[in-house]
Image (cartoon, helix red, strand yellow):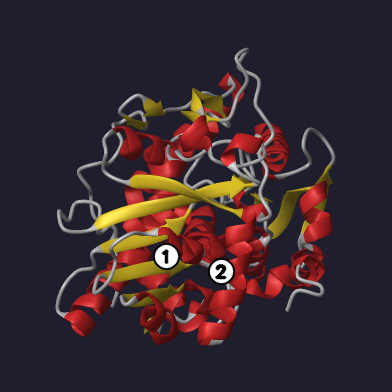
Amino acid sequence: MNYIPTAFGFDPDERGHFGKFGGRFVPETLMPALLELDEAYKAVRFDSGFWDEVNDLLHEYVGRPSPLYLAEGLGDELGANIYLKREDLNHTGAHKVNNTIAQGLLAKRMGKRRVIAETGAGQHGVATATIAALMGLECEIFMGAKDVQRQELNVFRMKLLGAKVHAVESGSRTLKDAMNDAIRHWVTHARDTFYIIGTAAGPHPYPLMVRDFQAIISHEAKQQILQKEQRIPDYVLACIGGGSNALGMFAHFIEEETTQCIGIEAGGRGLASGQHGASLALGRPGILHGQLSYLLQTDEGQINEAYSISAGLDYPGIGPEHSYLMEQGKVVYDSVTDDEAMDAFVWLSRAEGIVPAFESAHAIAYLRKMPDIRDKTIIVSLSGRGDKDMVQAMDILKGKL
């Protein structure tokens, strides 16, 4: 099941715009590094030699293809055919490694000796540190101090793998601020440093590049569901923070007229509470981290703090392609609250013996909110496993199990 990207009808233009969204809104000092990266990616995007290297590592090191698993426990309760795309079974425990392997190989081709990354839930940081160790690259990770506290296991894993971890104390001390510091660092170290962005956000070519690297998820899932059901699914679900997992899950289904793609944002304590990460539901277009996209912001244009029980969904913006797909009506977006996600966390654990990441639990939770799904076929991206969330889950669920 070897993978190589294909051009889609919703690819960005030459300057990285999905309609009005995307682009490169960065300091002039960073433009040479982005243009260098753009040229390097153009050279390998459809190059079979590069993708032979990527696929070899994805098969032999990561363990792809990931299974498409029929979740009969969930399906029996809902009267539907529920399939889970098991990205949680990848080496490092999430979808993030699909992206870091390809970016790591690109960094080596470009002659870079150091890689940096931002991380929220820690899975991208772990995946970056893992690939840096594998490929002999120096590695530094920027992580909000709040996330360092709630994801201490992943912080230890990064350090074990040889990475230096910076706890970012500015702002809300979460993913947004980690990305701010990573970009500042890159500005002054671009000559020898490759920035491995973990989501389909940031300045061009990152949103395109990361989506291409994650589209292997739907490339595999489409072949697998055709083999199992002899038809494509009625629905495809994925949680959304910045949006790489969702775009990877949607890419090969978006243009299928009989499949509805649904992205699930972090509803936090409820959309009316003001404590959520629902950028598409309640945000408006603005500029953050080098891109134009939907953001949570004040009337004066200041970024509002996002909130989610899940560190990976705790982000006040979203990748520009999602903003475009929403405005074009290609994808439906909705949200799930913390409480609904935690109920689903327990539900999947007990119904299938699979403990999901808090992020993935948001997508699982949405199954219970969907009307009229009896006899429908649904694929849910299980983007990561719940090991990283055990300490937090023990505290939240204490006395409730």
In the rendered view, tell whether residue 319 sits above or below residue 153. above
- The residue type indicated by label 1 comes to Leu
Residue 389 in the image: x percent, y percent? 71, 68
Residue position marked by numbered label 1 in the rendering: 367
Is residue 283 toward the left or the right of residue 257 in the image? right
Q: Which residue is drawn at 24% across and 74% down?
A: 375
Residue 56 in the image: x percent, y percent? 41, 77
Compare residues 374 and 189 and report the one nearer the observer: 374
Q: Is mark 1 on a helix, strand or loop?
A: helix
Q: Which residue is drawn at 60% across and 35% down?
A: 272
Q: What element carries label 2?
A: helix
In the rendered view, tell whether residue 73 sits above or below residue 188. below
Specify the quadrant that holds the C terminus.
bottom right
- The residue type indicated by label 2 comes to Ala
Tell me which label, 2 or 1, sits earlier in the chain: 2
Is mark 2 in CB contact (under 8 Å) with mark 1?
A: yes
Residue position marked by numbered label 2 in the rendering: 344
Q: Residue at x 77, y 65 (%)?
A: 396
Neighbour class for label 2 at 10 Å: few (<14), some, many (≥20)?
many
Residue 45 in the image: x percent, y percent? 32, 52
Residue 35 shows in this picture: yes
Compare residues 310 and 399 and report the one nearer the observer: 399
Is residue 167 toward the left or the right of residue 200 in the image? right
